[in-house]
Amino acid sequence: MKYIELTVHTSSEASELIADVMWEYTVSGVAISDVADVVALQKDKNVFWDYIDDGVAGDKGDVLVKCFLECAAAEETSAEIMRAVRMRKDLAGGEIPFGTLEETKREIDGDDWIDVWKKHFRPIPIGKSVVIVPEWIDYKKEPHEVVVLLDSNMAFGTGEHETTSMCLEFLQDYLKEGDVCIDVGCGSGILGIAAAKLGAKRSYLTDIDPIAVESSRHNAEKNGVADHVVVAHANLLDNSDVKGDIVLANITAEILVLLAPSMPKNLKEKGTLILSGILNDRVEKVKAAFGVVGLRTAQERHKGEWCALVLERGR
């Protein structure tokens, strides 16, 4: 089947915001090509990476965010996407660089880009024991490994990005057998599913994107943990009676600040809050917002331009 590939040139800081916009208009796929991610991955000897989009290594150093649109509605849909992207830029008020927002379109064979992507993806070891494995790869695990199978055709969140890997590392440090875990903004479900496979008795996953909700349910089934995972189409859990020993949120700093007053209601008294998706220059804003509601920073980790925090209630 033929598709129109829409490519938007932007910055690392704005790339995930633009990807979020694109997912609102397509179910056919979104991809981010960021040379900074590739450089970081090449330095990490635990990660296998042998493919890079030719355009991302050019002189401009732009991050390329791509989506794939059905041909018949491509012109109208791409115009709507760009209007929504510019609205996000206006709402950011200059705090986030969006780059040139140059756009290009070309016709491609949909089967070709999926096959190329699959060919070059490899298992990703993260932290002490977790290995993220694409579901189409026959992977023989080591005895100490916890394998999370992922079908990433349906939604973003594969584990290779620094924000996700830091969350998974902290999760392995703090999760105890029998804990309850809550994943806010679950995307592909990678964090909540990993928690279930690491021994959580229940994982509650929420997301405002219906595609992410579908993806999380699909991936939970693939991993054999559907009986331990509850997925809800929501910003946060509506039920304040559900309390997590671990609450995870890998979303942007701006959204974390907005959610700060609401998140503690679902955190147990001695629970742990793990936050990621925070650019280094926004860390203090996030700390301040959660400090107001009585949560203090217990641990902080940086990878590249990103930061992850572990927060606990003040003693």
Image (spheres, rainbow, N blue to C red):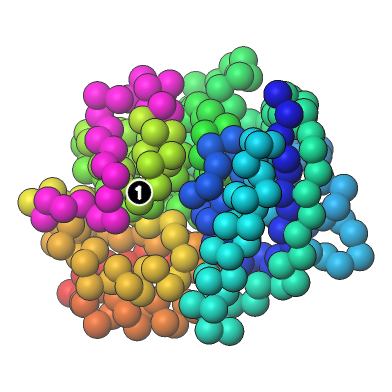
Q: Is residue 31 left or right of residue 165?
A: right
Residue beneath the point at 53% across and 37% down: 27
Label 1 Cα neighbours within 10 Å, binned few <14 / some 14-19 / many ≥20: many
* 189 lies above or below 61: above
Q: Position of residue 99 (x, y in %)?
A: 72, 72
Q: Amino acid at mark 1?
A: Asp
Q: Position of residue 213 (x, y in %)?
A: 37, 39
Residue beneath the point at 35% across and 51% down: 208
Residues drawn in magenta: 218-240
Q: Quadrant of residue 18?
A: bottom right
Quadrant showing the C terminus: bottom left
Q: Nearer the viewer, residue 297 or 289?
A: 289
Q: Is residue 32 left or right of residue 207?
A: right
Quadrant showing the N terminus: top right
Number of marks present in the image shown = 1
* 24 lies above or below 98: above
Q: Position of residue 141 (x, y in %)?
A: 55, 21
Q: Is residue 3 left or right of residue 267?
A: right
Q: Nearer the viewer, residue 22 or 129?
A: 22
Q: Nearer the viewer, residue 2 or 233?
A: 2
Residue beneath the point at 49% across and 62% down: 277
Instruction: Return the residue at label 1.
Output: 207
Query: Residue 237 colored magenta?
Result: yes
Residue beneath the point at 43% across and 73% down: 254
Q: Position of residue 220 (x, y in %)?
A: 37, 28
